[in-house]
Amino acid sequence: MDNHLSFLLLFLIFYRVSAGRHVSVQAGGSITIPCSYDQYYINHVKYWCKGYDWNRCSSVVRTDHPKSTDRASISDYIAQRVFTVIMTDLEPEDSNTYRCVVEINGGIDSMIQWFYLSVTPGTPELYVDQQEVTGVEGGSVTVHCYYSNSGDMKWCRMGGDGVSGYSGTLNGTSVTLKRTSEANNRTVLTVTMSGLKMENTDWYWCRVGELEMPVHITVSQQTATQRTSKMSSSTQDPTPQQPSASPTAESVQTDNTSQGAEGNMEEVHQRSVKVLLISLGMLVVVTAGILVTWKMCRKHKDNKAKDQTTNNSVSDDPEQDITYSTVTHTRETAQQQDPFPEADDDVTYSTVIPQHKAQLKGQTKSAEPDDNVVYSSLALQVTTQQRAAAQ
């Protein structure tokens, strides 16, 4: 029963193993090979072995020991369920069949993938500028695959679907393929992935015919510097440029196009912030102006009130009530007035009539502005007989 289960498990594993891959590398160069494994093997030991015969495949590097040699190293990325093997300083003698293997304790080791590595002294039939490409979220990346062989062109995600022809999508990301010819009888397959997402970080394969070359794409979030640079470039006036057939110029143009929507949103946000700051600045200036004007008016009113108080204090004294005496002469008989004079004498009497200064303003302007003074003038005149008698 146990043998049947082991055989069934082994059959399922081999059923999931894809066909071998043919990789070409120039002598003296290096290459990175990714090996994807099932979640069931996370805690298992993985290794890279060399040999055409599976029963005689000798281990080169292992995730337990040795993890590296003078020209090979292995790394296990458990979170991505991928382990990678890097081989450097390759020589034609290194051309052989290699396998990605998972060690099974107490059972038959499981082969995940096998490769045929061809090391050529000249330019390989299929190669890329670099195997590590980095992009930003919402942006784009461009990969140039140079090849001299013939066959169908395809861009595939490791363990997933692929895009052939001229365009397609992978996990919601737009992919375009463009083929151009070079003067040295080589053809360039330009692969552009636009509208990148964080989940697009993975290994991909550039395939032409039977040859393949792995490329790792890393998508990162935009930094503040990149956002600022994008805003400055979007606010500048566009300058006419001459059309260029170079892959580099084309990749830059595609990147700007793919990031346009996000750049516009960022630009609108920045402009809103600027308008808000300007409005706040104007409000502060207006408020300060109002405060200064109010203080000046207040100070002016205080000074004016002070001046009025001083004037009132100076003019209050003359305005105070002054009692004046007006003397009127009345000639009457002795019987009507004083009983003491003699009956035959004429007597002149003076009558004191108090008057306030306010009443006298209309009558005279010669009054002395003495405060709180009562004037009285008394004139007594007697007859000629009295004078003579007095003499």
Image (cartoon, rainbow, N blue to C red):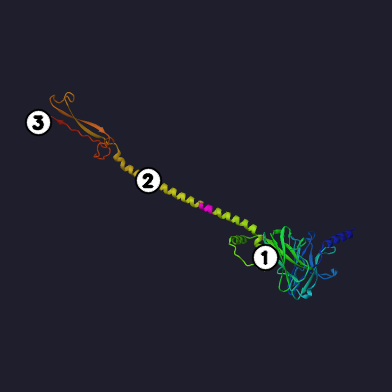
Q: Residue at x 57, y 54 (%)?
A: 273
Label 1 – label 3 distance at C-alpha: 144 Å
- Image vertical order of residue 294 relative to residue 112, above or below: above
Q: Position of residue 263 (x, y in %)?
A: 63, 58
Q: Position of residue 317 (x, y in %)?
A: 30, 40
The image quarter containing residue 234 is bottom right
Instruction: In the rendered structure, find residue 388 and report the number of the disc placed on it.
Output: 3
Q: Which residue is mark 2?
A: 304
Q: Quick check: 174 left or right of 318?
A: right
Question: Looking at the picture, which amino acid does disc 1 mark?
Answer: Ser
Residue range (magenta): 278-282
Callout in the foreground (3, 2): 2
State whether residue 156 appears in this view. Answer: no
Q: Residue furthest toward the right?
A: 1
Q: Residues within 10 Å of mark 2 (few under 14, many from 20)?
A: few
Question: Looking at the picture, which amino acid does disc 2 mark?
Answer: Lys
Q: Position of residue 208 (x, y in %)?
A: 77, 67
Closest to the observer, 303 or 173 = 173
User: Is the residue under label 3 in contact with that under label 1 (CB below 8 Å)?
Assistant: no
Q: Residues within 10 Å of mark 3 (few under 14, many from 20)?
A: few
Q: Position of residue 13 (x, y in %)?
A: 83, 61
Callout in the foreground (1, 3): 1
Question: Looking at the picture, which amino acid does disc 3 mark?
Answer: Ala
Instruction: In the rendered structure, find residue 362 and report the number of the disc placed on it.
Output: none
State whether residue 384 appears in this view. Answer: yes
Residue 81 highlighted magenta (yes or no): no
Quadrant of the frame with the N terminus: bottom right
Say whether disc 3 or disc 2 marks the residue closer to the N-terminus: 2
| Main SS category, magenta section | helix
Q: Which residue is mark 1?
A: 251
Q: Quick check: 377 left or right of 155?
A: left
